[in-house]
Amino acid sequence: MNKSPRIFLTRRLPPQTMRRLDESATLLSVDLDRPLRPEELAEGIRDADGLICLLTDKIDGELLDANPDLKVVSNYAVGFNNIDLQAATERHVAVTNTPDVLTDCTADMAWALLMTSARRVLEGDRLVRSGQWSGWGPLQLLGTEVTGSTLGLVGFGRIAQAVAQRAKAFQMRILYWNRTRLSPQREAELGVEYRELDELLPECDFVSIHVALCDQTRHLISAPQFAAMKSSATLINTARGAVVDEEALVAALQRSDIAAAALDVYEHEPEVQAPLLEMDNVVLAPHLGSATINTRTKMGNLALENCLAACRGERPPNLVNTDWTAR
């Protein structure tokens, strides 16, 4: 298209992306630092060629009907469970995401949660800050050994494989479950062993979630899975909150079916089950998986490139609804 595309942005992105946006498009935004209400989203896209949105923005058929000429929904995330893909495809709206750029960053976060929980770092921090720490003691805040323990990865995409690479440095035994099993040669190269999910859970000291959220994975980890885990095990989730049944997690922790949990995502984000807030054996992070300057900037630039390509009528580099056709 000859004229500058009109792009509606639901939240301000890192400075480099904002500069590029200003240079290459006509920016439409409400500049509110909060998730937009449905009516605000609908008003925002009314005159737009493209939309750059976040996981917190629900994009369905009713919203898309607010602008029959919208060309693209560019999601500032790897996941896209906030978007109705069928509704978008039916309306010839391209849907894109930002894969690959946050693999290492999210793997680092999963590892940070694992270590923080295993070594009870937050409890120690609170103790020191309270002024009640009386000095070193042989039984004080004893944690879980990480080196040489068994790590279970539920899902084995790019991020899980990056977590596995980090686990090797700690001489961990690494088990994985995935809907598609790797070849024996690839398993040997990565130093991992395959297990069916119900076989993996009882063997692991740490279980880390790395599956996308869909109908098949919603509440994949619920009461039966917690009952199958070691009572000394820790659950780590940096994927999507609803993969874990949060009520079942609370019950499992209260019954000591598992020892601890470390979470970066939540089933009803930003709401968190109230009992989790009071548990010393739970680490809670505010969805920081991709939260570094470099990664968030790369995500923004990729989201912009996807959006601009679709606005030009081209096939975007990271198209999610692969059966999309332009108008």
Image (cartoon, rainbow, N blue to C red):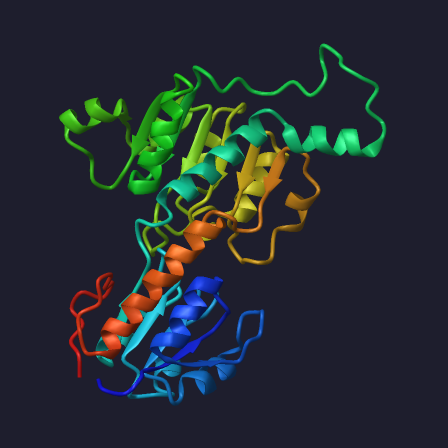
User: Against 181, is 9 above or below?
Assistant: below
x 64%, y 44%: residue: 276
Q: Is residue 55 visible?
A: no
Task: Name the quadrant containing residue 150.
Answer: top left
Point out the image quarter for the N terminus.
Answer: bottom left
Between 263 and 113, the one lying in front of the other is 113
User: Against 92, is 120 above or below?
Assistant: above
x 40%, y 26%: residue: 151
Q: Is residue 175 left or right of residue 282?
A: left
Q: Is residue 149 left or right of residue 274?
A: left
x 58%, y 31%: residue: 116
Point out the image quarter for the C terminus.
Answer: bottom left
Between 266 and 169, the one lying in front of the other is 169
User: Against 244, is 202 above or below?
Assistant: above
Q: Picture coordinates of residue 257 (x, y %)?
A: 55, 30
Q: Picture coordinates of residue 248 (x, y %)?
A: 53, 43
Q: Is residue 285 visible?
A: yes
Task: Name the quadrant containing residue 126.
Answer: top right
Q: Is residue 248 left or right of residue 217?
A: right
Q: Picture coordinates of residue 291 (x, y %)?
A: 49, 50
Q: Picture coordinates of residue 85 (x, y %)?
A: 28, 69
